[in-house]
Image: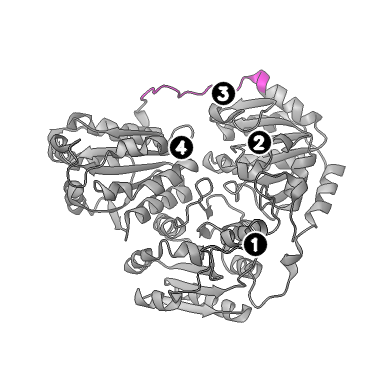
Amino acid sequence: MQISGSQIVIECLIEQGVDTVFGYPGGAILNIYDALYKNSNRIRHILTTHEQGASHAADGYARSTGKVGVCMATSGPGATNLVTGIATAYMDSIPMVAITCNVTQSQLGKDSFQEIDITGVTMPITKHNFIVRDVKDLADTIRKAFYIAKSDRPGPVLIDIPKDITSAVTEYEAVDPSKLDFNLPSKKIPFPSEQQIENAAKLIDESQKPFIYAGGGVITSEASDELFSFATKANIPVAMSLMGKAAFPNKHELSLGMIGMHGTYAANTACDNCDLLLAIGCRFSDRVIGEAAKFAKNAKILQIDIDPTEVNKMINVDDALLGDIKSILAKLTAKIQKKEKSQWNSQIEEWKKIVPPSYNKKQDLSPKFIFEYVNSQVKEDTIITTEVGQHQMWTAQFYDFTKPRTFLTSGGLGTMGFGTGAAIGAKFANPEKTVVHFAGDGSFRMNCNELATIEHYQLPIIIVILDNHALGNVRMWQTLFYEKRYSNTTLDFGPEWTTLASAYGIQGYHVKNEKEFKDAFDKALKSGKPAVIDAEIFLDEMVFPMIPPGKSIEYLLME
């Protein structure tokens, strides 16, 4: 069958099971948008307000489903506007395919209008990227991009297609994706040997004070059930990185909550005192380990990960099991001994009682109340998205996640402006689930234009702005480490958020106390329509516990 390059893009997306793409049109990509118009009954395109919103929406779609998210943009500034979203997905190992179109091949390299070397720009922040030079290679390039994006440790892949390739015609034949095997180098990571599994099981059985540090890799590999079986069989306490939140039910007695800079006292203290640290699907982020020389200083470390480059990168480990976490945990669970509660478990229960005094401080409207109330009113499969800052840490601290893929946040890159787009993607991917987006007023300034997208598609997303009229996290650091020199962190100027919401045709609520918040959230939830709740909180609200950057747990601040 002879078809154009633009039609090949559509056929290959459908071939890969893609039902939704997020994007913004422009001159160089017009042929593909024409094909989208002609095939609107077969594939859905969501027009965002900005290309960055499209990239974050594709990311949110992927995080909430495990499928590959797809975004597209035109050449030049359209392509560069995707870059932050691509980098966000790369840092958090999210499967994404970004499709850009460039000027025609005859215009490449000549500083043509809206020309950019987007493959050069994105080389450091993609698993792989392609520029298609021959329409005959287009179909296999798209297939290869999806294969790379979702295989092994997932990540974003970019395909740049010159405009003349989208109009050129060639032979196309559909292919079953399940039968594709590109046999790319660096694939086929061998599963640990039986002896390696036996050795690891022996290490676990002999440990008196074992401790699990679980990261986002547990969720990526769909291994939450296996982690639960493993931890409960041996009664091993579990702490999670920010990306690992929701990998293990927060209310379970073995859960210690989050580990790291703003992790719980119990999680950090248990890590400091354990004799065996099981690092599962995590990358030893600097926000977790602090002073590397003192991290888990009394423990042997066993790392389980699919990516060999993560072993001994930040922390030297005693042993490593490389491969799919889900399969490895299943094997290990079958080998380890069942253990009853020990003195170690009892000690940890005592540590869990130690919380910052601010948790119990009475206020008109506290972050803790906001998160606990929302948590009490929605179903456990509700999807929570965040921006980046204090509200993000409070979400991780106070919201009791029980199911994987219900907490979508930018962990590695820390992208302010991520969450609204991610909420849009998550809602399109999961129309039957409630989506609540928590934002700080500083972060929300960066993406509030996507309210237009939310209103246009009538997405019943509830946005809760924790409004302290400041860049709260940066101001907090200025308070603690810069002698209260508040340089450019005070946001005592517009917009007035409910008025802005109204301008977009969205219901807004301005609340200052617990009763007002409860009333507003209840109305928003019941309405089944988009809503923005501007929740006034104390200007100098702090996030505790806190370990200062680069320090060890001995410097833990509780107030």
Q: Is 194 covered by the magenta stretch? A: yes
Viewer-side residue, 382 vs 268: 268
Mark with earlier residue (1, 3): 3
Real-space Cα separation, disc 3 to disc 4, in angstroms: 18 Å
Identify the coloring: one colour
Real-space Cα separation, disc 1 to disc 3, in angstroms: 49 Å
The residue indicated by pointer 1 is 479
Query: Which of the two marks, 3 or 2, is nearer to us in this view?
Result: 2
The residue indicated by pointer 2 is 279
Q: Amino acid at mark 3?
A: Phe
Q: Amino acid at mark 4?
A: Pro
Q: Amino acid at mark 1?
A: Thr
The residue indicated by pointer 4 is 154
- At numbered mark 4, what does the secondary structure look like: helix, strand or loop? loop
- The picture places residue 558, in percent across and down from the top left corner, at 75, 58
- The picture places residue 311, in percent across and down from the top left corner, at 60, 28
Q: Residues within 10 Å of mark 2 (few under 14, many from 20)?
A: many
- At numbered mark 3, what does the secondary structure look like: helix, strand or loop? loop
Vertical order, 229 against 180 (above or below):
below
Mark with earlier residue (3, 4): 4
Do the numbered discs 1 and 2 sit on residues whose CB atoms are within 8 Å? no
Mark with earlier residue (1, 2): 2
Where is the C terminus found, in terms of image quarters?
bottom right
Real-space Cα separation, disc 1 to disc 2, in angstroms: 33 Å
Q: Which residues are magenta?
A: 182-196
Query: Which of the two marks, 3 or 4, is nearer to us in this view?
Result: 4
The residue indicated by pointer 3 is 191
Residue at (53%, 59%) from the top-left corner?
A: 384
Would residue 314 appear left or right of 165 to someone viewing this image? right
